[in-house]
């Protein structure tokens, strides 16, 4: 049997066309830049809202109790050292404000970075926003998504295909 006249088998996994015909944003890992950018905007929005909620609670919670109520609650726990009500209020503002500021900073960085990265602009800004987005872990609620997004985003943004896609649009 002579197989020389038969056409070569087609590889279903091979990219079509020549490499020069394919835009750089459609090659390899660069296809995932838009996914990372959208996830960054979603995570940034959630972190921003969570941070604002923490700051609001920091200022609202101390005003829910007056000094007499705090002293009554502390009197029910004899043998322990108690803070005066004014110090306790400032501690709550500081703790919740500090926790919330991490989410606010992460959100204010990730929202515009994600928007720019959708148009293949600002790769360095996107990397900085991913890394600094980790401070949203101070809210506790945003820690899992911020960590996962940072790892995934860094894998995508450090890839040579992604670098070429950003370079082609700059």
Image (cartoon, rainbow, N blue to C red):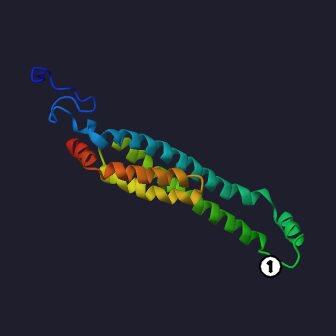
Q: Is residue 87 above or below residue 122?
A: below
As drawn, 43 above or below 143: above
- Quarter of the figure that contains the N terminus: top left
Label tally: 1
Residue 54: quarter of image: bottom right
Residue 89 visible in the current orientation? yes
Q: Is residue 6 left or right of residue 127?
A: left
Q: Position of residue 79 (x, y in %)?
A: 86, 79
Q: Depth check: 154 or 70 in front?
A: 154
* Quadrant placement of the C terminus: top left
Measuring 64% from the left and 53% from the top, which residue is drawn there?
56
54 to the left or right of 165: right
**Image: 137 above or below 152:** below
Q: Residue at x 62, y 56 (%)?
A: 55
Disc 1 secondary structure class: loop
Q: Is residue 5 above or below residue 115?
A: above
Q: Position of residue 145 (x, y in %)?
A: 52, 50
Q: Residue at x 59, y 57 (%)?
A: 140
Question: Is residue 126 visible to us here?
Answer: no
Query: On the rendered structure, is 133 left or right of 62?
Result: left
Crowdedness near tag 1: few (<14), some (14–19) or many (≥20) residues, C-alpha within 10 Å: few
Which corner quadrant of the image does residue 128 belong to?
bottom left
Residue 49 position in % (x across, y down)? 57, 47
Q: Residue beneath label 1, please?
A: 81
Looking at the image, which residue is at 49% across and 42% down?
42
In the rendered image, the residue lying farthest to the front is 1
Whole-percent x, y for residue 137 in the image? 54, 58
């Amino acid at each position: 049997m002579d197989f020389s006249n038969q056409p070569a088998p087609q590889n279903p996994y091979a990219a079509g066309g020549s490499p020069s015909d394919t835009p750089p944003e459609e090659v390899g890992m660069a296809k995932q830049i838009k996914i990372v950018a959208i996830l960054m905007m979603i995570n940034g929005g959630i972190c921003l809202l969570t941070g604002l909620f923490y700051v609001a609670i920091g200022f609202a919670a101390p005003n829910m109790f007056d000094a007499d109520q705090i002293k009554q609650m502390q009197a029910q726990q004899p043998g322990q050292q108690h803070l005066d009500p004014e110090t306790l209020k400032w501690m709550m503002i500081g703790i919740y404000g500090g926790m919330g500021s991490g989410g606010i900073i992460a959100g204010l960085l990730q929202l515009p970075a994600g928007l720019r990265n959708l148009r293949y602009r600002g790769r360095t800004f996107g990397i900085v926003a991913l890394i600094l987005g980790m401070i949203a872990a101070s809210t506790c609620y945003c820690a899992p998504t911020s960590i996962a997004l940072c790892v995934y985003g860094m894998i995508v943004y450090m890839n040579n295909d992604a670098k070429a896609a950003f370079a082609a649009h700059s």
